[in-house]
């Protein structure tokens, strides 16, 4: 995604944030070997080394090249090697072949980062104009997106290794009492949605506009691993009744029988591969690594089981509920700063909706499309969002791999319906208060 350039941070504060974000990206690669950083496990994923270089390429291309006097590229070939899909900048190395870029070495990529950092910080010390500051802020949010992608790509990579390697030590899961699923009614009506004037937002979050909501209810919490195991036990993956036509074709053609990374343990119970290695599923943790097809099928199955008109929420129903929670819900969410790197169970019941921010991205029923009055930004920066507004579905809320400062109620993530390697889960909605 790209952003609507907008930054009011003073230069010193922005420089500190620049250093913090850039340092955090390197820290995420600390548990990895050089071989770990090189390999690409599937076309949708990228090597960690490529992520380190690409986010640096962004600052070199959109900041230094535009604002640095007597600009010279760090290495002329990097313009193509580490361009993702900015056609306005020029050619790109094929995405599916990023793992073949064995040179530059990891050490050379780190040196590239250090050189670009020094040049960017020098620019920032020279009373940067507002446009430069806005592009740097955009670049930092872009890098935070790649921090999450780096973790999800590493998870997929390590899952392919028969040794089930551990990225980091297991998280401590304290026993908790399950929180009963309950319904939080909303009368609906005309509400305002979209970016409402925060310091920073991606361009696809606006313009803010009115949206009509039908009366509905949202579940107070996310669907859990244990509830998903019930769906599997009831032959949920083998009954076409619950599936969209494209989803049923996907299940049969891909041989899907469970969420990504699930496998049977030695004693017959379900285990899941995580960034902490292979662990038994915890029945109270939110389900993750499911596609839109699976989330929709579960909602249809649950509707029949419980005798309620259940479905996935629209992105506007979700946003209206999340916006009313305010900053505390974000500050206390399970994000990458929690260092759990896995969804966590609800520790206590509360009146409002739980787990709206962090833990897992929540699938919605909304196609990713432009808001009324949306216009892409000018130039190559404008390629980031608008051109992807087809065949994608919106997800909301962030995940356990998302940086906390990166998320807000209006944030719109998007992926194709079959995507599973991200931390994707679901919250149910109901057409009646239940």
Image (cartoon, grey):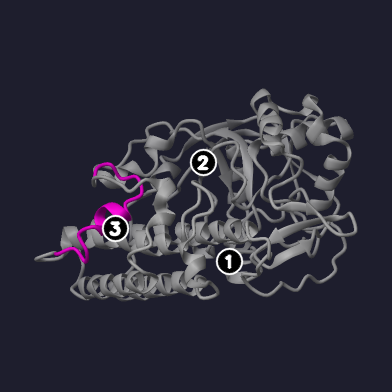
Q: Residues within 10 Å of mark 1 (few under 14, many from 20)?
A: many
- Mark sitting earlier along the chain (1/3): 3
In the image, the segment drawn in magenta is 72-88
Task: Kindly report the distance in space between the C-alpha atoms of the residues bearing marks 2 and 3.
Answer: 25 Å
Q: Nearer the viewer, residue 212 or 384?
A: 384
Q: Position of residue 202 (x, y in %)?
A: 41, 49
Q: Give the number of the disc on residue 177.
A: none
Q: Quadrant of residue 419?
A: top right
| Left/right of residue 370 with respect to residue 244 in the rendered view | left
Residue at mark 1: 336
In terms of image quadrants, where is residue 434?
top right
Query: Which circle, 1 or 3, is nearer the viewer?
Result: 1
Circle 1 or circle 2, nearest the eye: 1
Tag 3 residue: 135
Q: Residues within 10 Å of mark 2 (few under 14, many from 20)?
A: many
Taking the magenta stretch, the answer to whether it contains residue 312 is no
Nearer to us: label 2 or label 3: 3
| Label 2: which secondary element | strand
Give yes or no for residue 85 being in the magenta stretch.
yes
State the residue position of label 2. Answer: 193
**Label located before the other in sequence (1 or 2):** 2
């Amino acid at each position: 995604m790209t952003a609507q350039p907008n930054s009011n941070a003073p230069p010193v504060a922005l420089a500190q944030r620049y250093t913090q974000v850039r340092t955090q990206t390197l820290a995420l690669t600390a548990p990895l070997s050089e071989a770990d950083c090189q390999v690409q496990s599937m076309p949708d994923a990228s090597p960690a080394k490529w992520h380190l270089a690409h986010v640096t390429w962004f600052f070199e291309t959109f900041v230094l090249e535009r604002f640095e006097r007597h600009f010279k590229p760090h290495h002329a070939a990097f313009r193509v090697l580490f361009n993702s899909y900015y056609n306005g900048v020029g050619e790109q190395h094929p995405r599916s072949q990023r793992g073949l870029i064995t040179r530059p070495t990891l050490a050379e990529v780190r040196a590239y980062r250090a050189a670009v950092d020094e040049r960017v910080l020098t620019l920032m010390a020279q009373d940067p104009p507002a446009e430069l500051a806005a592009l740097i802020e955009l670049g930092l949010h872009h890098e935070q997106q790649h921090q999450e992608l780096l973790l999800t790509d590493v998870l997929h990579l390590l899952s392919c290794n028969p040794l089930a390697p551990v990225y980091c030590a297991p998280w401590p899961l304290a026993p908790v009492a399950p929180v009963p699923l309950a319904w939080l009614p909303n009368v609906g009506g005309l509400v305002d949605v979209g970016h409402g004037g925060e310091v920073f937002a991606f361009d696809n979050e606006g313009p803010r506009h009115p949206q009509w909501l039908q009366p509905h209810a949202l579940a107070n919490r996310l669907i859990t691993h244990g509830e998903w195991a019930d769906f599997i036990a009831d032959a949920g993956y083998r009954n076409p009744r619950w599936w969209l036509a494209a989803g049923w074709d996907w299940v049969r053609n891909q041989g899907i029988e469970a969420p990504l990374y699930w496998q049977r343990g030695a004693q017959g119970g379900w285990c899941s591969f995580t960034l902490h290695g292979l662990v038994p599923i915890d029945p109270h943790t939110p389900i993750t690594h499911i596609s839109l097809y699976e989330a929709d099928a579960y909602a249809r199955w649950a509707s029949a089981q419980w005798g309620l008109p259940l479905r996935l929420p629209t992105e506007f129903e979700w946003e209206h509920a999340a916006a009313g929670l305010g900053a505390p819900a974000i500050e206390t969410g399970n994000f990458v700063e929690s260092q759990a790197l896995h969804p966590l169970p609800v520790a206590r019941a509360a009146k409002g909706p739980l787990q709206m921010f962090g833990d897992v991205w929540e699938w919605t029923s909304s196609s990713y499309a432009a808001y009324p009055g949306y216009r892409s930004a000018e130039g190559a920066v404008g390629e980031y969002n608008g051109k992807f507004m087809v065949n994608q579905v919106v997800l909301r809320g962030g995940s356990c791999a998302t940086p906390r400062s990166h998320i807000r109620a209006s944030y719109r993530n998007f992926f194709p319906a079959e995507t599973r390697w991200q931390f994707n889960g679901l919250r149910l909605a109901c057409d009646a208060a239940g």
